[in-house]
Image: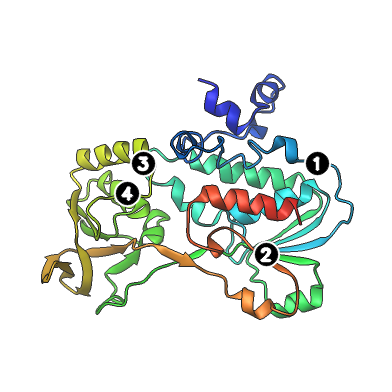
Amino acid sequence: AMGRASLADPHWPEKAANGRCNDIRQCIGCLQGCTASTYQGVPIYCMVNPELGHEYELDYSKAPALKKLYIVGAGIAGMEAARGAALRGHQVELFEKRNTVGGQFISASYPPYKGEFATYTAWLYREMMKHDNIHLHLNTELTAQMVRDGKPDKVILATGAAPVIPQVPGIENENVVLAEDVLLGRSDTGMNVLVAGGGMVGSETAAYLGMQCKSKVTVIEMRDEIALDMEAGIRDDLKDCLNRCYVDILTKTSLAGVTAEGALLKQGDTVTLFPCDTVVLAIGTRAFCPLKEELDGICETVIVGDAVQARQAIQASREGFNAGYYA
């Protein structure tokens, strides 16, 4: 019962015994490192504990030369970078253009059975607030001029990824919304919903909608299987949830366009109209890092997480922590 919990936070018993429950770094049950490592043939690792397996390499004393760091983006990678840098005594200015921290990991906690994901974001925020050398700037988009004026020693770019928008007719119609906006409650859907994209985000969004008792929820996926980017055991649980919520799954199917009546679906060489109220886009994401070229020649930069390549949060946490710790 304490196996994964001890990997996420080996000090769990000590913190609990001393009433420091908010300091415990909770296992979120993602299985992306602990279980995956067994069939990957690599040492065990963990999304919420990027130090796991590297304890012997880490020295938390002050760095020989303290630096001024600018970190762009307060998602998982950016917050881990801030935490890692602060532990070594560096001065951190963390910039986030939105009004809250967490990035895409906020919406990741809304699908069925994933509420525990929110504990990681909350823990990172609490840890950052313990450090006087971390200054968080919300509603602030860092610019090249701000870097010129502030003269940091290094800028860590953790700007994440942006959703892929397919270039098909009607994609800008009002009945087309993004999966992240649906999960966050920024966009509503009708009762008959088509989710375009059957990866982790699309499949989980479909389950989220299915549990709201929509009259019909359908997922389309270009490949012959859905949720292939998920750990096998969790994928099986998700597929069971989709089945219990009567979510229809159409594989080898792509989005060819959108009309006021619904979606145009392509299967082989055939395009047909699929009547629906709302099309939810979950095609995927791509790296978003507009500042990289602007900062060339101004300041040393390091890119981490999805800003390098859209992947899973387990890569973001490790890359972010390393960028800050070894700054």
Q: Quadrant of the C terminus?
A: bottom right
* Residue kind at label 2, given as amino acid type: Val
Q: What is the image's colouring?
A: rainbow
Seen from the viewer's position, the closer of residues 186 and 297 is 297
- Label pair 3/1, CB-CB below 8 angstroms: no
Tell whether 25 sits left or right of 219.
right
State the image coordinates of residue 246 (x, y, percent, origin top left).
18, 44
2 or 1: tag closer to the N-terminus: 1
4 or 2: tag closer to the N-terminus: 4
Q: Secondary structure at mark 2?
A: strand
Which residue carries the number 1 mark? 60
Which residue carries the number 2 mark? 302
4 or 3: tag closer to the N-terminus: 3
Q: Residues within 10 Å of mark 1 (few under 14, many from 20)?
A: few
Instruction: Answer above or below: position of 63 versus 58.
Output: below
Tell whether 318 sits left or right of 249.
right
Q: Residues within 10 Å of mark 3 (few under 14, many from 20)?
A: some
